[in-house]
Amino acid sequence: MSRQSVLFLCTGNSARSQMAEAFLRKYAGDAFEAHSAGLEPTVLNPFTINVMDEIGIDISNQQSKGVEMYLGKKHFEYLITVCDDADRNCPTFWPGVHLRMHWSFEDPAKFEGSDEEKLAKFREIRDLLERKIKEWVLEQDGILQI
């Protein structure tokens, strides 16, 4: 069985898409090849690394990548935008994409508050993404590795 490739896309590729990529790797095992990118890549947000580490997932070696890295170079069965900005501004035609989906998640990096309040927002988005990934993986032939 060949692995299906999935690209999670957001604006900065600093939080949501990075978390989604890591969760798909964790819960889908060898069934999917997970990638993430941003329309305007920045750097991996330290709060993202922290909240994923809290639940035992080390993403400290992941890097923020731009869509140019993949557009026209890699075929994806699934392109999943995880923010409204990426959904609006993603190229409408992406060669090789079989199914484009949109999951709307708030950007935790835009949340303003104390560091503790920011961490709480990142945890909230992390938990919502984890739940969504688990549900989606179960819909795909019932594959779920815990």
Image: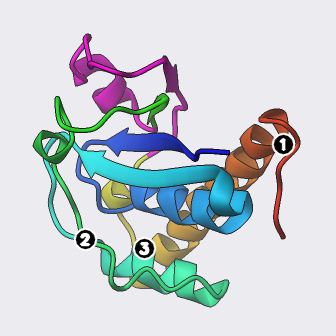
93 with respect to 113 (left or right): left
Q: Residue furthest front?
A: 1
Q: Residues within 10 Å of mark 2 (few under 14, many from 20)?
A: some
For marks 3 and 2, the one nearer the N-term is 3
The picture places residue 83, in percent across and down from the top left corner, at 41, 36
Instruction: Tell me if I can see residue 146 in this picture.
Output: yes
Secondary structure state at the residue bearing disc 3? helix
Q: Is residue 140 above or below residue 144?
A: above
Q: Is residue 22 above or below residue 140?
A: below
**Amino acid type, residue under disc 3 in the picture:** Thr
Q: Residue furthest right?
A: 142
**Amino acid type, residue under disc 2 in the picture:** Gln
Q: Which residues are magenta?
A: 82-106
Residue at 25%, 11% in the rendered image = 93
Q: Is residue 139 above or below residue 49?
A: above
- In this rendered view, identify the residue nearer to me: 137 or 41: 137
**Residue at label 1?**
138
The picture places residue 15, in percent across and down from the top left corner, at 39, 61
Q: Residues within 10 Å of mark 1 (few under 14, many from 20)?
A: some
Instruction: Tell me if I can see residue 114 in this picture.
Output: no
**Residue at label 2?**
63
**Residue at label 3?**
48
For marks 2 and 1, the one nearer the N-term is 2
